[in-house]
Image: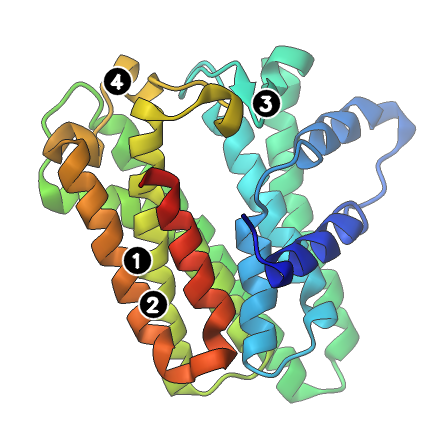
Amino acid sequence: MQSKEYLRFKELVEEHLLYFLPEVDHKSITLYESMTYSLQAGGKLLRPVLLLAACDFCGGEEKLALPYACAIEYIHTYSLIHDDLPAMDDDDLRRGIPTNHKVFGEAIAILAGDGLLTSAFEAMNKDMLLYFDNTEKLKRRVRAVYEISKGAGCRGMIAGQVADMETENKQCSKELLDYIHVNKTAALIKAAVRAGAHLAGADKKTLGELDEYAENLGLAFQIADDILDIDGDVEKLGKNTGVDLIKKKSTYPCLYGLEESKLRVRELTDNAKRVMEPYYDNAEFFVELAEELANRVK
């Protein structure tokens, strides 16, 4: 069950999720419909929630971080649309509804993903234009955009996706498996936390601790997803299970088995919680979130 604080951040994102999308000419309305179809399909909104929570934790104004929170959800949603395409995971169910390409066709789904990705940077850059007369606040926003760009790009999420695809039907070392997970999933989670911290002007020590927390959380989150692909409930997950086995993907359960994978989730979760425990009640949100995500695979 999501905490009250999580739900508060989530509702704030949901209220503003379409606000930062650019206006689309009616001649291209199908593009907008396709983009918003996937954006409004539900989901945990984990990354934007983490961005707002990190900003709030570091003393920033969460409402001023909304363009960046929504932007990171645009990027995450674009990645899901493209992941589901026949050329990649070839899925027909996402968040409990038909995948984007099943409704709008492959070409529009590809363009909707492209539209969401570029809209993310348009939203963030539009916000930065408001701070040309405040160098410090502008620098914070530039740092946030850099973190999100890096986490989503060829040194982050996309790098992990490429390695993931190239190891299908092949034996995979532990080092390469960690590389896939750290980049494919943890990189954008780290980017969300680091961006939120930068927006609040976090000091180097706090940023480093949040970074360590996010990497452990992100890796645990992906391993848990791998486990749920084997023994999860389709209705609860909102997506098909058994996909990794069919595609012969490199996952923790395939390499180590279910029980050892669950132990690894617990180890990473405990690491994440340990990093934040010195902050006591101020870090309650982060400690509870780590435990809640781990409990998905008890």
- At 32% from the left and 74% from the top, the residue drawn is 275
Rounded to the nearest angstrom, the CA distance separating label 3 from label 2 is 31 Å
- Secondary structure of residue under mark 3: loop
Q: Out of 255 and 289, give the one closest to the viewer.
A: 289
Q: Quadrant of residue 243?
A: top left
**Amino acid type, callout 1:** Thr
Residue located at (45% from left, 18% from top): 240
| Distance from the alpha carbon under mark 2 to that under mark 1 | 6 Å
Q: Earlier in the sequence, mark 3 or mark 2?
A: 3
Q: Single out the residue that lies furthest toward the right.
A: 26
Looking at the rendered structure, the secondary structure element under dot 2 is helix
Can residue 293 be seen in the rendering of this structure?
yes
The residue wearing badge 2 is 273
Left/right placement of residue 155 relative to residue 175 reads right
Q: Residue under circle 3?
A: 96
Q: Earlier in the sequence, mark 1 or mark 4?
A: 4
Under mark 3, the amino acid is Gly
Report the residue marked by disc 1: 269
Is disc 2 in contact with disc 1, using a CB cutoff of under 8 Å?
yes
> Are the two marked residues, 3 and 2, in contact with CB atoms closer than 8 angstroms?
no
Quadrant placement of the C terminus: top left
Label 1 CA crowd tier, 10 Å (few <14, some 14–19, many 20+): many
Query: Which residue is under mark 4?
Result: 245
Q: CA distance from mark 1 to mark 4?
A: 25 Å
Q: Amino acid at mark 4?
A: Leu
Q: Earlier in the sequence, mark 4 or mark 2?
A: 4
User: Alpha carbon of mark 4 to alpha carbon of mark 2: how far?
Assistant: 31 Å
Q: Residue at x 65, y 36 (%)?
A: 42
**1 vs 4, front mark:** 1
Q: Is residue 15 above or below residue 124?
A: above
